Image: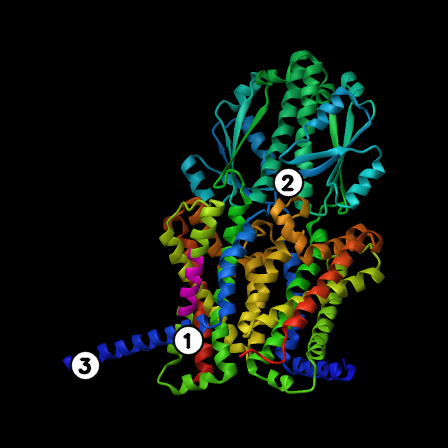
Amino acid sequence: MIMKKGNILSKTAIWLLRLRVMTVKELLQLSRDFILIFFVVYAFTVDIYSAGAGVTLQLNKAATVFHDNDRSFASRELISRFQEPHFSLKGEILHPSEGLRLLDKDKAMIVLDIPPRFQESLLEGEPVSVQLQVDATNSVLGFLAASYGEQIVGEFGLEAGLKRLGMSASGAETLPMIKDDHRVWFNPNQNDAWFMSITELLNIITVFAILLPAAAMVREKERGTVEQLLVSPLTPFQIMVPKMLAMTMVILAGTAVSLFAVMEPVFHVPIKGSVLLFFLVTTLYILNTAGLGLFAATIARNLAQVGMLTVLIVAPMIFLSGAWTPPEAMVPWMRLFMYMSPLHYYIDSCLGILLKGAGLDILWDSVLIMVLLGSTVFGLGMWRFRRQFS
Amino acid sequence: MNIKRIFVVAHKEWREIVRDRLFFSLAFIVPAFLMILFGYGISMDVEDIPFVVMDQDGSRMSRDYSYRFIDSRYFDFKGYVHDEHTLTLLLTDNKVRAAIIIPEHFQKDLLNGRPVHVQTLIDGTFPFRAQTTKGYVTAINAAMSRELLAGYLSRTRGIPIERARGIVRPVRLEVRYLYNQSVKSIWSVAPKLIMVIMMLSPPFLTALGVVREKESGSIYNIYASTVRRGEFLLGKLVPYVGISTMNMFILWLMATKLYGAPFKGQVSFFVPASILYVICTTGIGLVASVFVRTQIAAIIVTVILTMIPAVLYSGCLIPIPSLSGQAQTIAHMLPAMYYTNIVMGSFLKGVGLKSLWPNVLILAGYATILFTIGFSLFTKRPRS
């Protein structure tokens, strides 16, 4: 009885020892590729920084020129309302063709055209139109420019109309109107850096979680060192899992660096939820996604193929994750694919934890689906791997 | 430089690529696949925003008001909620992106000629979607206000309703969208996708091609042969430039035929300019491959180095003028932005060499610099 127990204990000890030795081997191998390490660090710091810094999808000081055919008090008043932060007046043009030329050369994004007799029409109560030409090469910003323009002109018109009736604009407090009281939650200033840096971090985690273990595996195949491993007493599981463990450690370290050295101090990303939960979910995600890499590794025969396959897997995951295009705006069949992407659930959870302060009580369903999807793929990868090497 | 030797190296490389069937087919499949994926997958249109209404008034007017959102194609009604706790939960759990809270006495106040404050809660996690949502909300509120006001004026002042409408909205704004009249995202996205994909794929292929020889050791054959380094590099790159040029053509076809993006420029300008860009991005792969020793490093270096600049600093998502000062400097230092100008000019604006020549010149300069760096750092005598 005691013998048997001791036997089991020593077996477990050996099992753990093998796991440890192999993990250390992987870490050592990784750390000796200096350029690789350099770029892992680069990805988790500089790359995250450049994704978050300066990139904004808001209408920010859009270059606006105007063509004032009226040169009246009213026209100047309207023009002066096109102000920062959304617009930035770049001066007057004297001819419409000059506006087109500026638009062509990307020197201006918006041309505001005020017709002659603008003030006169206003005073006489005739309807009048002003024209806004918008460079819609970027459709999001084009839409925003039109929408802000509409707001400015609408308010201006309303004030002018009320004034004509002898009511002051401030008298609007005594008029039946809807006062727009919007509040933006979770990111009140719509700071793009938060969103950009978080999603970029998640993307990088995805790339590494798939690529690193897959590459570590295929490299052994390509060089033939896998034969040595196969004749050793290691089981396929003991060959495979240390690779994933080692890479998970590297990625988690990188994540910590970018969270505490870039995102929090530089971009002031509010970490509202539990940091522990964030790292727990991340670990789960990395291990699960590594399954996809394993799967790719069983198909590929050399590293070049692994690289291409990774792109083939990662790109759809990132683009169908719901970070860029919300699920509600997707074509239905694409949405179906999105619900199959573990990254979708991971992004939901991470944005929830970091920005919204959500806990497991709210996120449990996302985490659960992520784990289920991940373990299915992981199982599949493991199964193919065993079949290949047994 | 011996043309024959270059040809031999190129031929050898070509055979090697073709014989790796999976790699060869992926070299064509991946770009086309990305084009389909990005084209259908990226939609910057903000529509069907899921939202809930918390109607604390429950009157005829408050229902009319909610229906303005419910009927709008920009919003997707998910039902009424009755307490703030549920509302918070729904927003936190990503189930809805906006919530409208109609206060008590909504109808009473409006009928008595008093303003009401309607609160809208918007999920700001995705900043640009929050911006757009805000725009929709403001527009719907403004339209409702104008109608209320017109009705009020006609009742209290005895002005005919038509005239009252004119009074509250004397100035109309006519918006003309240039270059992309229908503001369809796919039109403006498809040409830029060519730029993005051709920034990602050539460096990747090239770096792998060169580093593969280094890692497997077959490069020692080259070190020991009569092939000069210039000949070797040129021969090595020719097949990749060829493959990428083919891809470029496929992507162009997809953009025009599949996505129906208009091509208004001249082919005679666009083709050489595009080949120049491909040479340029191939050069990035060359420089990367000189530095790294392992293929895995080559993959990571090229992906990390090209992805962010291609998407964020190229004018693809965000026009260069609206980047911050520092980001603008970065953008000007990278080739992607210049080619974006060329693609957008050729596709949507229909301008040619006459106004785009500075971009072509800069790309040419870029290619020269990259190849010079690659050439001077590549040595046939490896440092031990």
Query: In screen coordinates, is B287 left or right of A208?
Result: right
Question: Which residue is found at the position 71% from the left and 48% from the top?
Answer: B184
Residue B253 appears in the picture as rendered:
no
Q: In the image, which residues are magenta?
A: A246-256
Q: Chain of mark 2?
A: A
| Circle 2 residue | A59
- Magenta segment main secondary structure: helix
Question: Which residue is found at the position 55% from the left and 76% from the top?
Answer: A303
Q: Which mark is residue A240?
A: 1
A123 or A74: nearer the eye? Answer: A74
Q: Which mark is residue A4?
A: 3
Q: Chain of mark 3?
A: A
Kind of residue sitting beneath label 3: Lys
Q: Earlier in the sequence, mark 2 or mark 1?
A: 2
Q: Secondary structure at mark 3?
A: helix
Question: Which residue is found at the position 46% from the left and 68% from the top?
Answer: A290
